[in-house]
Image: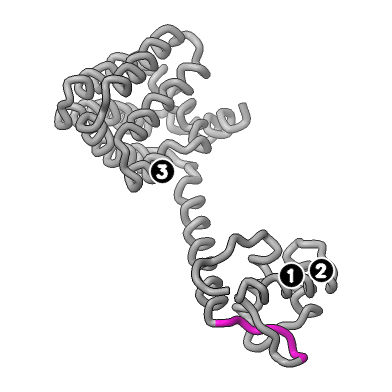
Amino acid sequence: MNGAAPDLDLEEERLLGIVWRADGPVGARLAGRQLRESGLEISEATVSRIFKRLDDFGLTMPSGRKGRTLTEHGRRCAEAMSARQRHEEEFARAFDIRTVEQLLDLLHGRRGVEREIAGRAASRATDDDVAGLEEILRRHESILGDDERARQIGMEFHRAIARIAGSDLLGALAGAVLNESLVPLEKVLDVITGGHGTVSQSVPEHAEIVSAIRRREPAAAEEAMARHLTRLIDEVTDFSRSDQVRIFDRLLMFTRQS
């Protein structure tokens, strides 16, 4: 089978990778040993069945009695799979925030992405979209005393604007910088802004963003979003220059465990 790469399970992906990295044909015995060394408990017979599936996908082909080699389609799929895995590993490392400097990098990234998203949302928002944002605002304001729920609704607000923007590319970037795995950092931001007495400022800042979107003024929406995130950047910068920065590691560890 040629064309698009098939959806492979973990065992199939690992086996395809073994054949791709090999200098010559790979048999079930050698492949099984390498799979077990990688942490998969698998028998030689199971490896043979997986090879048969890869043959059926058009990814591998028998090479006499020596084992399997890749087809041209299999080579392209293996290269694409390897590139995807490298990208995922790089992505995970980039968003494994462990220092104040990395947190600032994230906020600068958010400012760039979300500024564009806010402008796009202002040019595309329907009346229903605006009503939805206003409802999120009301909910946010009503539960400011509940830190956990307020954080969740604050993130919901930013994600809602990204959906309204209607851009696949900007949506993908927003999905990265507003990912659920980064929620512990929102707790850190709350502690930092709480120390400055500014936690509640997010609601009026969000209201300014919604007002610009309601008026369908992209430039004003961009500026309102930029001001909101610049304020967070400035507060984290001040924190990074204070004696309190020494507790950042413990603070991050605590928020990830809670």
The magenta stretch spans residue 245: no
Residue 228 showing in the rendered view: yes
Question: Split into 4 quadrants, where in the image is the C terminus?
Answer: top right
Which residue is the site of mark 1?
50
Q: Quadrant of the N terminus?
A: bottom right
Q: Which residues are magenta?
A: 65-71
Q: Are marks 2 and 1 in contact (CB under 8 Å)?
A: yes
Within the magenta stretch, is there residue 69? yes
| Mark 2 residue crowding within 10 angstroms, few (<14) / some (14–19) / many (20+) | few
For image coordinates 85% across by 72% down, the residue present is 45
Q: Position of residue 225 (x, y in %)?
A: 25, 29
Q: Position of residue 143 (x, y in %)?
A: 46, 9
Labels 1 and 3 touching (C-beta < 8 A) = no
Considering depth in this image, is 242 or 178 the residue closer to the camera?
Answer: 178
Q: CA distance from mark 2 to mark 1?
A: 6 Å
Query: In front of the other: label 1 or label 3?
Result: 1
From the viewer's side, name the closer residue of 30 and 6.
6
Horizontal arrangement in the rendering, residue 89 relative to residue 126 (left or right): right
Residue 36 on image: x %, y %: 78, 67
Q: How many marks?
A: 3
Answer with mark 3 or mark 2, whichever residue precedes in sequence.
Answer: 2
- Indicate which label's residue lies in the foreground, 3 or 2: 2
Q: Which residue is mark 3?
A: 102
Establish if 231 lies above or below 25: above
The residue tagged with tag 2: helix, strand or loop? Answer: helix
**Which mark is on residue 46?**
2
Q: Up-down: is 241 above or below 87?
A: above
